[in-house]
Image: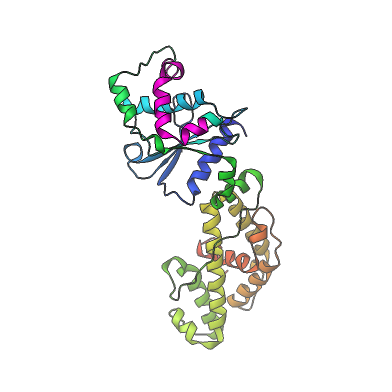
Amino acid sequence: MSDKRLEQFVHRWAKVMSNRNYVDVQIFADAGDMGRDVVGFLTKQRHEGPWHNYQCKQLARTLQIGTALLDLGKIIYYSYRGEFILPERFTFVAPRGMSRTLEHLLYNPTELKEKIISSWSEYCQTKIIKNEVINLESGLLDHLNNFDFSCVDRVTLDDILSDSSVNPVLAAYFGADPGAPPPHTVPSNVEKTELRYVNELLDAYGERERCLYNNHEDVIAHSKYATHFSEQRERFYRADAFNRFYRDNTLVEEMDDLQGEIYHGIIERHREAYADCLARVNAVMSQAASIPPAGLLAKHARVPIRQGICHLIVNDGKLSWKL
């Protein structure tokens, strides 16, 4: 990966990290980044509240002391100037690893602090801002001493690959298997979020029986359609869990492509003439089951999910069981 690609990768990964609760994640990596690459904000106060900094280092060799101390020096200096408060966590993302000496300092925060103080003139004094000398004088030194150097750590390639939440990001960048979606639950009561497709099903049952079903309880009490209705809700919630998992895990384009495949795979069957709307529902469900999906999500888009996607499309108002 190039520097930019690594920053984009970490940006997407930070959005889905299983052990973080960021309200926002931003990339600041440019000429005026002030020592920030990818930032995860833990509150809506953004830089006025707790935040984490991910410093991405895609180098030709392992990360060395001088480079690391300069990055820390920038954060300390610009926070001293009031651009932001000190981060709660400072993480070097270095796929090629770091030097043993630097690694030792990260595991010994007191030594890391002593090293940046003793080496300030070598690594930071004239390098934070071009053509400016930044001396480690009393105010800045006090500010540096207030920084908790135990918050500085590193992320290796093994760390990235061991985080299960990174799988969809690996899929987006490298075509890796994004992993299966989590288990789903079907609430006993119909939720507001599913009323559109449920009401269309109620109308379809009512059309066939020449009666009016006022709510889903009426259908459940009608043994003829209770099982059918339960199956459709099961499909809807499986597809809904599938959809939310992959969208939330950065695979929006793949999910859009899959829904597009399902839509175009069923639409001609949907437009055919039927005796009633319920016949159309059943024909489309059969057609959806026979569609061979492609793409990264194909392995996990099983028959009930493909059928449930049809109900998602109806629930979004993009399709109706009526013509």
Q: In the rendered image, is residue 49 in sight?
A: yes
Residue 1, compared with residue 290, is above or below; it is above
Q: In the rendered image, is residue 321 in sight?
A: no
Snapshot colouring: rainbow
Residue 2, compared with residue 177, is above or below; it is above
Residue 262, compared with residue 187, is above or below; it is above
Q: Position of residue 221 (x, y in %)?
A: 48, 86
Is 109 magenta? The answer is yes
Is 267 magenta? The answer is no
* Quadrant housing residue 124: top left
Secondary structure mostly taken by the magenta-highlighted segment of the chain: helix
Q: Quadrant of the C terminus?
A: bottom right
Rendered residue at 54%/38% (across/down): 8
* Front-most of residues 288 and 112: 112
Rendered residue at 45%/69% (across/down): 195
* Front-most of residues 317 and 78: 78
Residue extending farthest to the top is: 131
Q: Position of residue 121 (x, y in %)?
A: 42, 16
Q: Quadrant of the N terminus?
A: top right
Q: Position of residue 78 (x, y in %)?
A: 36, 26
Drawn side of residue 3 relative to residue 215, left or right: right
* Front-most of residues 41 and 89: 89
State the extent of the magenta-drawn residues as a range.
Answer: 102-129
Q: Position of residue 294 (x, y in %)?
A: 69, 55
